[in-house]
Each structure stands twice: as C-alpha cells, then as structure tokens.
Image (cartoon, rainbow, N blue to C red):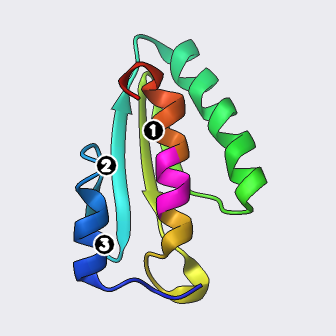
Amino acid sequence: MKKLSEQDIEKKLLHLPEWDYYDDALHAEFEFENFKDCFSAMSRIAFECEALNHHPDWSNVYNVLTISLSTHDANGVTEKDFQLAKAIETIVEPDEE
C-alpha cells in the first residue's frame, strides 16, 4: 500500500468529519451511552478489522473509544486506513448513512 499525500488525506477527510489527521495517522474519539455499548461497538469493529486484515491502535475508558489508524508498513496513512475508518463510521453511527 502506498502512503497518501497530506493533500489527498485532507480531501478524503471531508467525507469523514469525525476524524482528524495528525502524527501520520487518522484519529477519532467516539462516546457511547455506557461501557456495554462501547464494548459492543468494539466487538463489531474487530470483525471488520479481521476482514480487512488491518488493525487499529485503540483504547477505551468506560464509554469512550479512542482510535488511531495508520499503515505501519507504509509509515503513514493509506487507502486501507480510510476503508477501515468508513467501516467504523458505519458501525458507530449507522443512522447517519
């Protein structure tokens, strides 16, 4: 996978307003009603990660899920990161599609 230019990344982020780009990665934070809802979303995201063979750096504290996406082999953001970000958006905010 080829690392995307900062200009390409900024253009693609226009379609993902929940996400930011800094430190050579895409970043987002999602807040849920409670821990159970957060963990449930993480479980669904895990299946997408396995399907794409692409795994985030993520953490959760109670009802907040923090995600960072980058492609380590490319030392930055690639199309694969955007594919996973879109899948995460669909899982986390299905009503907004």
Q: Say which mark, if any, is on residue 16.
A: 2
Q: Quadrant of the C terminus?
A: top left
Q: Quadrant of the N terminus?
A: bottom right
Q: Position of residue 52 (x, y in %)?
A: 71, 58
* Residue that badge 1 annotates: 89
How far apart marks 3 and 2 lie (CA) works out to 11 Å
Residue at image position (24%, 46%) is 17
Residues 11 and 76: in front is: 11
How far apart marks 3 and 1 lie (CA) works out to 17 Å
Mark 2 neighbour density, 10 Å: few (under 14) some (14–19) many (20 or more):
some
- Taking 94 as reference, is 45 above or below it? below
The amino acid at mark 3 is: Ile
Mark 3 neighbour density, 10 Å: few (under 14) some (14–19) many (20 or more):
some
Residues 36 and 85: in front is: 85
What range of the chain is rendered magenta? 82-86
Residue at the far front: name it: 97
**Secondary structure type for disc 3:** helix
3 or 1: tag closer to the N-terminus: 3
Q: Say which mark, if any, is on residue 9.
A: 3
Residue at image position (63%, 22%) is 40
